[in-house]
């Protein structure tokens, strides 16, 4: 590890590198750089900042970086975290690592038309590594034994089944048990991203067989019954635009099955009213039910480890910047023993401190997806330091322009630059910053002198022909050529990875880029540049999303907001003028390089070379802010040289740091929960339809449907074509019984976006409730057409076929749902219950046991299978499953009640009595259990009287 020491004034060397070993002829002096007078010791000596060792400075900067954002460590997965982490199948253990390099940041195939082409495999790999210690390795083979059901060697003709209903016993223990599949009318809530609970599952209990997926939506050739069934209401699954599925939001849905003659419709209605919970938000809320197929055990409920890594990365980058700023401010310098000095310690410490506490970094640090910016910056500055090392490797006098360079360190710099690009596209700009450092700082090519030489090109060519290029110029040109070639290769590879096509965005993502009027595009983009500059100067105005009307378009120069870009360009023009014609000293060079570090990393986000999918993104300012603090410190250094009241400047700096720390702390707390984040966005961007949309989702989660409807309607007023808002508003209206308006909204949503699969499915649900089965079936199949792997749609399609009494088709649809999503509890449950009601207990048992293997910790599956086994008089097996279900849901009254029925039929009356009483204790309104308890006590009294009479007879 490189050791730094403070530069001693006694060395007599300060300032920056001097041009090296130039020829002494008059012509050489004319066309080569003139040696500049060495600057006074300690260029930053005027700054009212303590002079610290590298160790102390690193410790303080690290602590400040952690202090600012410590409140984000226990935050939720918010906003884009849902799609990038919660719903990203690339993070699953069974996904091959090489697939990460074929998908974009959100887990979509790069060849997909919906992919945003954000290729960041190294960042995704760190997300995946983040949860390795909690990963549950799941490989779920879903099959059915050939002897009985689905996919077996023995064929089964569904048409041989009897088309009649099951007649249950009418005795004291009528087993009207699983006669009703758990169906409740509901809807699918559109989300931009989503998440849910996880299911624990032991892979070692599975048999090592592969799944044979069907080649079409309904082409399973297994045995399906065609018996008729009186359909019940359906439980649609909650879904999302992103392709993942929600678990059913109603708790204990299996409690609908009772072992008594109770009107199923009444039970279902009661469950619907008492257990309904709104669809969860797509930005970090945990929903019940299974997630994807697999997930990190505790990973969703404990995202703190993801946030902790972000905090540590930010602290590491801030410490790394001490070295970067030292090189830029004070150069690469060594003491007599050859050890590297910590040059310009005051300026480096101040710049690193200002960077560490800048509030604009909150989104990058507090948002988990901000890790892309953090990793990109880490490799970016590492590539820069390696490039500096390559230029100075083997150079005896670091103050002179190098006449050679280290190929090894230059190659390391290129590799790190490529790694930065694999974390985020912005990393390619490291090449430009290295080039600027080489020209401006290392070789001290003054722009004014360079331009004057270009104007005298004829004399310059004559000199070159006569004297030849100096060695340092040759070395510089070779390094620049290497950088250009590297940049060309990386950009070509990046374009090839994208499929040689640009990403496709929607107008709502970046309205200015889609404007047909050139003047509107130019004015609005320049205004957006001014907003970014304002966020660097005054980072109090922060928002999680700046799209959808947050920044209204500028249509004419008469708009007062035009003054902002005018002020920006006047300021930049002044800086550029100083960088060109100013005195050639270290301050000017630092200013010029700071301007390069500010502008070059921002170029990919400025809409000049290609369209980006955002208006303003605070994350993209993470790298440019390093150039901003460079210029601020350089300006303060000049100010301190001419301002005698240094105590005032010192107090001002302390105040700025203190206020920034407070702002960072408050802002990181706002990034802790959805409600705080969205509410803060409402204060900053009241015209942003997406902010109102998310507020509506939050209020819907809280059960405040009136407020949610108002928020959704306001979002639609701001953006009349906001299809996702139409979808969610339709869901709430549907739950309130306003089916007509819900249908109109969903029809409008699919008209705006015909490939909107979730809206098509929701439209099918509404049409099914409106008794339009043909339209509902068409909507379901359209949804599946646009999203082939859509298990929830297959599930709801099966429910529709059940209503139509097409039992074979219903089983086919549910079967496809479990093939696509083996953890689909409701599909498994409905298959078991329907087979049970059709009298096929053997097949229901097989399906139930397979479901238990896939979902060994799901009490509803255990409960349903126990009901089947109980009806088949397999009391011991049923008893074990009942107790397993009760262990996981000890307060489920019907679990105890049905176990009581089992003991009742089994003849274990004392155990049955205890179970009945426990069930009534948990649910005093359970009339069926009360009736069964009365029957049991009557039987026990009869037996007791009979035994008492027999005893008297013997006497």
Image (tube, rainbow, N blue to C red):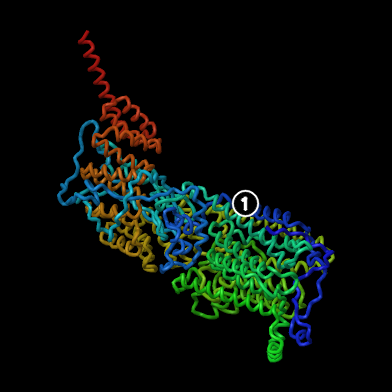
Number of numbered discs on residues: 1
Residue 318 locus on image (x, y percent): 66, 59
Query: Dividing the image into 4 quarters, which one contains the N terminus?
Result: bottom right
Residue 583 locus on image (x, y percent): 77, 78
Q: Could you say which is closer to the camera, residue 46 or residue 428?
A: 428
Locate residue 401 relative to residue 541 in the image: left or right.
Answer: right
Q: Residues within 10 Å of mark 1 (few under 14, many from 20)?
A: some
Establish if 709 lies above or below 230: below
Q: Could you say which is closer to the camera, residue 293 or residue 803?
A: 293
Query: In which quarter of the view is residue 440 placed?
Result: bottom right
Locate residue 100 relative to residue 144 in the image: left or right.
Answer: right
Residue 751 locus on image (x, y percent): 36, 68
Label 1: which residue?
A: 70
Q: Could you say which is closer to the camera, residue 564 or residue 159?
A: 159
Establish if 171 lies above or below 274: above
Q: Which residue occupies 62% across, 76% down?
A: 562
Please, which residue is most extreme toward the top here?
A: 955
Residue 159 locus on image (x, y percent): 16, 52
Locate residue 83 relative to residue 366 in the image: left or right.
Answer: left
Establish if 853 lies above or below 817: above
Element under label 1? helix
Tell me if I can see residue 835 in this picture: yes
Q: Which residue occupies 42% across, 45% down?
A: 200
Tell me if I can see residue 455 in this picture: no
Query: Dividing the image into 4 quarters, which one contains the C terminus?
Result: top left
Establish if 397 lies above or below 765: below
């Amino acid at each position: 590890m490189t050791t730094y020491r403070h530069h001693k004034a006694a060395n007599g060397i300060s300032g920056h590198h001097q041009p090296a070993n130039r020829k002494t002829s008059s012509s050489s002096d004319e066309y080569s750089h003139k040696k500049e007078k060495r600057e006074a010791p300690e260029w930053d000596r005027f700054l009212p900042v303590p002079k610290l060792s590298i160790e102390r400075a690193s410790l303080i900067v690290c602590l400040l970086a952690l202090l600012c954002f410590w409140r984000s460590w226990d935050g939720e997965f918010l906003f884009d975290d849902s799609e990038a982490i919660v719903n990203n199948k690339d993070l699953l253990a069974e996904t091959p690592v090489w697939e990460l390099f074929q998908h974009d940041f959100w887990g979509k195939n790069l060849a997909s038309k919906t992919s945003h082409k954000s290729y960041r495999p190294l960042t995704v790999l760190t997300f995946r590594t983040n949860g390795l210690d909690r990963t549950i390795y799941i490989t779920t083979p879903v099959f059915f034994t050939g002897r009985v059901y689905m996919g077996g060697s023995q064929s089964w003709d569904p048409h041989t089944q009897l088309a009649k209903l099951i007649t249950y016993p009418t005795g004291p223990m009528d087993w009207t048990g699983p006669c009703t599949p758990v169906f409740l009318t509901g809807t699918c809530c559109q989300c931009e991203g989503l998440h849910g609970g996880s299911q624990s599952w032991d892979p070692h209990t599975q048999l090592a067989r592969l799944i044979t997926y069907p080649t079409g939506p309904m082409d399973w050739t297994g045995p399906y019954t065609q018996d008729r069934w009186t359909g019940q209401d359906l439980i649609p699954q909650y879904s999302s635009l992103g392709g993942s599925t929600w678990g059913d939001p109603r708790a204990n849905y299996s409690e609908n099955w009772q072992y008594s003659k109770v009107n199923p419709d009444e039970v279902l209605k009661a469950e619907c009213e008492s257990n309904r919970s709104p669809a969860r938000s797509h930005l970090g809320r945990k929903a019940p039910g299974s997630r994807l197929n697999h997930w990190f055990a505790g990973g969703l409920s404990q995202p703190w480890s993801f946030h902790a890594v972000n905090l540590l990365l930010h602290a590491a980058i801030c410490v790394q910047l001490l070295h970067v700023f030292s090189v830029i401010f004070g150069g690469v310098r060594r003491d007599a023993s050859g050890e590297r000095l910590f040059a310009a310690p005051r300026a480096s410490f101040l710049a690193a401190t200002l960077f560490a506490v800048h509030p604009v970094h909150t989104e990058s640090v507090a948002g988990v997806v901000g890790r892309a910016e953090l990793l990109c910056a880490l490799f970016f500055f590492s590539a820069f330091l390696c490039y500096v090392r390559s230029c100075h490797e083997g150079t005896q006098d670091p103050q002179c322009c190098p006449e050679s360079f280290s190929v090894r360190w230059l190659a390391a710099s290129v590799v790190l630059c490529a790694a930065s690009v694999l974390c985020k596209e912005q990393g390619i700009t490291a090449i430009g910053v290295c080039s600027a450092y080489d020209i401006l700082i290392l070789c001290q090519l003054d722009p004014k002198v360079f331009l004057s030489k270009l104007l005298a090109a004829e004399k310059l060519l004559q000199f070159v022909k006569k004297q030849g290029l100096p060695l340092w110029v040759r070395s510089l040109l070779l390094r620049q050529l290497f950088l250009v070639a590297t940049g060309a290769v990386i950009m070509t590879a990046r374009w090839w990875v994208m499929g040689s096509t640009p990403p496709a965005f929607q107008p709502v993502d970046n309205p200015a880029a889609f404007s047909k009027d050139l003047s509107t595009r130019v004015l609005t983009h320049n205004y957006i540049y001014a907003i970014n500059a304002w966020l660097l100067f005054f980072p109090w105005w922060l928002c999680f999303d700046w799209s959808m009307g947050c920044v209204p378009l500028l249509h004419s120069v008469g708009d007062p907001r035009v003054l902002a870009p005018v002020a920006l360009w006047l300021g930049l023009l002044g800086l550029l003028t100083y960088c060109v014609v100013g005195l050639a000293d270290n301050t000017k060079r630092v200013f010029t390089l700071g301007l390069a570090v500010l502008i070059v990393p921002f170029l990919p986000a400025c809409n000049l070379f290609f369209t980006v999918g955002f208006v303003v993104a605070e994350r993209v300012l993470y790298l440019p802010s390093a150039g901003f603090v460079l210029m601020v410190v350089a300006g303060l250094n000049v100010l301190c040289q001419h301002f005698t009241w240094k105590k005032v400047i010192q107090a001002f700096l302390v105040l700025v740091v203190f206020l920034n720390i407070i702002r960072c702390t408050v802002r990181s707390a706002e990034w802790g929960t959805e409600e705080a984040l969205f509410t803060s966005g409402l204060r900053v961007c009241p015209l942003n339809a997406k902010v109102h949309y998310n507020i509506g989702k939050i209020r819907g989660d809280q059960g405040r449907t009136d407020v949610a409807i108002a928020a959704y309607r306001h979002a639609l007023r701001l953006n009349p074509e906001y299809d996702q808002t139409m979808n969610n508003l339709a869901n709430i209206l549907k739950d309130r019984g306003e089916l007509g308006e819900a249908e109109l909204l969903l029809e409008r949503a699919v008209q705006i976006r015909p490939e909107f699969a979730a809206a098509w499915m929701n439209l099918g649900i509404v049409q099914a409730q409106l008794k339009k089965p043909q339209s509902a079936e068409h909507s379901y199949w359209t949804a599946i057409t646009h999203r082939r792997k859509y298990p929830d749609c297959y599930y709801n399609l099966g429910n529709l076929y059940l209503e139509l009494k097409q039992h074979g088709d219903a089983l086919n649809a549910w079967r496809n749902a479990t093939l696509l999503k083996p953890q689909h509890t409701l599909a498994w449950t409905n298959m078991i219950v329907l087979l049970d009601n059709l009298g096929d207990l053997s097949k229901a048992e097989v399906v139930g046991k397979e479901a238990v293997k896939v979902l060994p910790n799901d009490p509803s599956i255990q409960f349903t299978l126990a009901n089947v086994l109980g009806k088949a008089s397999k009391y011991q097996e049923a008893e074990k499953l009942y107790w397993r279900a009760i262990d996981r849901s000890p307060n489920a009254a019907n679990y105890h009640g049905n176990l009581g029925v089992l003991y009742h039929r089994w003849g274990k009356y004392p155990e049955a009595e205890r179970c009945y009483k426990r069930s009534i204790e948990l649910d005093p309104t359970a009339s069926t259990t009360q009736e069964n308890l009365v029957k049991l006590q009557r039987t026990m009294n009869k037996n007791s009287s009979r035994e008492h009479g027999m005893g008297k007879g013997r006497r």
